[in-house]
Image (cartoon, helix red, strand yellow):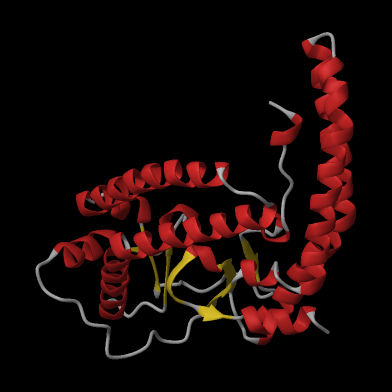
Amino acid sequence: MSIRSVPFLTIAALLLAALVAPQAIAADLTDVGFVDQAELASIPVFTNANRALAAYKSQLDGQYNAALRHAGSDADRQRISLQFQQQFSDKQREIVGPLFQRAQLAIAQVSAAHNLSVVVDKRIVIYGGQDITKDVETLFLGPQSIQPPAASPPPSEIGYVDQTVLDNLPKVKTANDEMNQFATTQRTLFAPRVAGAKTQADRQQIYQEFNKTVNDKQDQLLKPLVDETKHATSDVAAKKKLLLVLDRADVIYGGTDITADVQNELSK
């Protein structure tokens, strides 16, 4: 462990994974499905694609490091970094993009056949829901082309918020930037103490002091915004009669997007 490795949490990470609206979950949610994305990722065509992408990245990393050695300024380094990021993104779209698109179409087709209004990742499901993983795998691996379903998913009582969008709100960005700066300053202040510690016990005590300092500042800066975001989300969920609100990252298909509504509440 080192002082430099200690992270702090963003607004999105501090939010609960799910928010229950005031009326709570009382209905039998038969229109909710789930997919084991880890199982889909283990299909040979995906593992082969990821292996090819990893090999490309390894090659690209060597070129990137070589280019950085010839950079004459911070502006050059930033330009090189952006250039190589774009190269990797382009290759990722080329290798994985078509597979991802086919998987999404398979999920949409199976969901429509089961009349599901929302499909989530299996890892957030403890009980209930319809497991459509095998049906999606069968369709994905079949020889036929997959067309989008004719109809949109039915209205869902499951909502979602894109927390990465909320993290880009001005007041949230300001708080996160201030937290970043504070953590950087504290690392600089604590590093000499760690270097001068005579025993492991002394170093552990310094780590604990550092963590407490950063966590206290995090509570001061971010917790009010987290509470405000949760309240705004709950208010929107109640108005739209939603039973549950999830993070966008956990929703694979369907659901009710309330990101803009929550954004508007927070901007008031």
Q: Position of residue 252 (x, y in %)?
A: 42, 68
| Front residue of 199 and 218 | 199
Q: Is residue 111 visible?
A: yes
Q: Position of residue 25 (x, y in %)?
A: 58, 70
Occupied quadrant, residue 222: bottom right
Residue 27 versus residue 227 in the image, above or below: below
Residue 71 versus residue 5 in the image, above or below: below
Residue 198 versus residue 121 in the image, above or below: above
Q: Residue at x 48, y 81 (%)?
A: 156
| Front residue of 188 and 78 | 78
Locate the C terminus by quadrant: bottom right
User: Is residue 223 toward the left or the right of residue 116 in the image?
Assistant: right
Occupied quadrant, residue 70: top right
Q: Position of residue 82 (x, y in %)?
A: 55, 60
Q: Residue at x 82, y 21 (%)?
A: 194
* Residue at far bottom of view: 151
Locate the N terminus by quadrant: top right
* Residue at far left of view: 143
Q: Position of residue 45 (x, y in %)?
A: 21, 53
Q: Residue at x 41, y 79 (%)?
A: 117
